[in-house]
Image: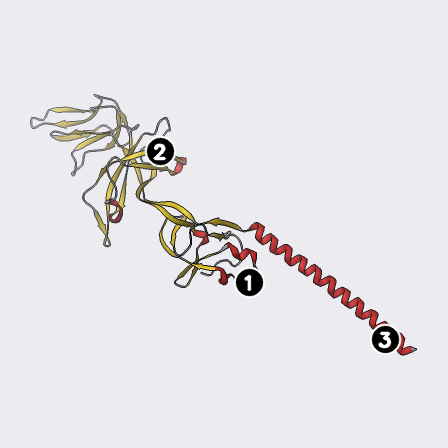
Amino acid sequence: MAKTKRRSKWIKRGVILALIVGVGAFFFIQQQTAARQRLIDNTKTTTIELGQIELFALASGKLTSSEETSVNVSGTLSRTLVKVGDRVTRNQRIGETRDVMGNTLAVRASRDGIITSLPSALNNAFVISNPNKFKLVVNISERDVSRLSVGQSAEIFIQSLNLTFQGEVSDIGLIGNTSLDFTTYPVTVVFDHGDEPLFLGMSASARISVSVFEDILIIPFEALIIDGTQRYVLSAEWLKETNRPQREFYVAVTTGVADIYNVQVSGENLEGLSIIVPDPSSSFPFFRR
């Protein structure tokens, strides 16, 4: 009788333990399924399609006036009546010279504007600039300058004001400046600033198109997987079988031209392929770099 009671007690304990294990396994599977569904729901995908990539020459500089007038000094400059930055009006006395007879002669402004340069040993003239007409001279690399042309459109960005203007290339310098075997050429961009209050000397950047590649397969940079010297994308088919290794769903690609957002890819059967674009802020191990 005692043995029967003990057996019954162990059976009850076994049943209870089995129920606990079963319930635990059920909840584990439920949590695993929910986690997998969250992964699927939160994963961004895209389709590889034909598009275009435009490459730009980017450079920065300081705003200067696009309308400058030189007032040459004849004779010996004896007195300067203005300084750089002064506003002057047409016929205003800006300096004095002495001729060979010792007579004092006035040097007068030939236009309204701002004094941007005084006579020196290199240039014996006052330079008067129009403060309402602007240009930007930037140095473009020898690789890109041959792809530019006068009259080509350009974008001007003023950092301090967060403003962008449309302009055009007005001049391409033919003589380069070489430093450490790297040569750049001065390219002048003019633009209309409208009613925006710009000032000479402001920092600005120019963006000029140098090449456009059309009808090429492109993907977001984030979708590119780099493994050693190989390049891959991760097929979205993996989302249907997330219990399998991602590597089994890698698709090999060859990369081409790129901008800061997209990269050209080529390979077999890529057009129309749905791929995964991981969130860069995610800790999920999409990348092997």
Residue drawn at point x = 60 percent, y = 52 percent: 38
84 sits to left or right of 242: left
Q: Which mark is residue 113?
A: none
**Residue type at numbered disc 1:** Arg
Q: Residues within 10 Å of mark 1 (few under 14, many from 20)?
A: few
Earlier in the chain: of badge 1 and badge 2, it is 2
- State the CA–CA distance, disc 1 to disc 3: 44 Å
269 sits to left or right of 241: left
Q: Secondary structure at mark 1?
A: loop
**Picture coordinates of residue 65, whole percent (x, y):** 27, 32
Quadrant hosting residue 14: bottom right
Q: Nearer the viewer, residue 196 or 200?
A: 196
Q: Which residue is mark 3?
A: 7
95 sits to left or right of 235: left
On-image quarter of the C terminus: bottom left
Q: Nearer the viewer, residue 141 or 276?
A: 276
Q: Which residue is mark 1?
A: 244
Q: Residues within 10 Å of mark 2 (few under 14, many from 20)?
A: some
Q: Which mark is residue 165?
A: 2
Q: Nearer the viewer, residue 61 or 15?
A: 15
Earlier in the chain: of badge 1 and badge 3, it is 3
Q: Residues within 10 Å of mark 3 (few under 14, many from 20)?
A: few
On-image quarter of the N terminus: bottom right
- State the CA–CA distance, disc 2 to disc 3: 90 Å
Residue extending farthest right: 1
**Residue type at numbered disc 3:** Arg
**Picture coordinates of residue 275, whole percent (x, y):** 48, 53
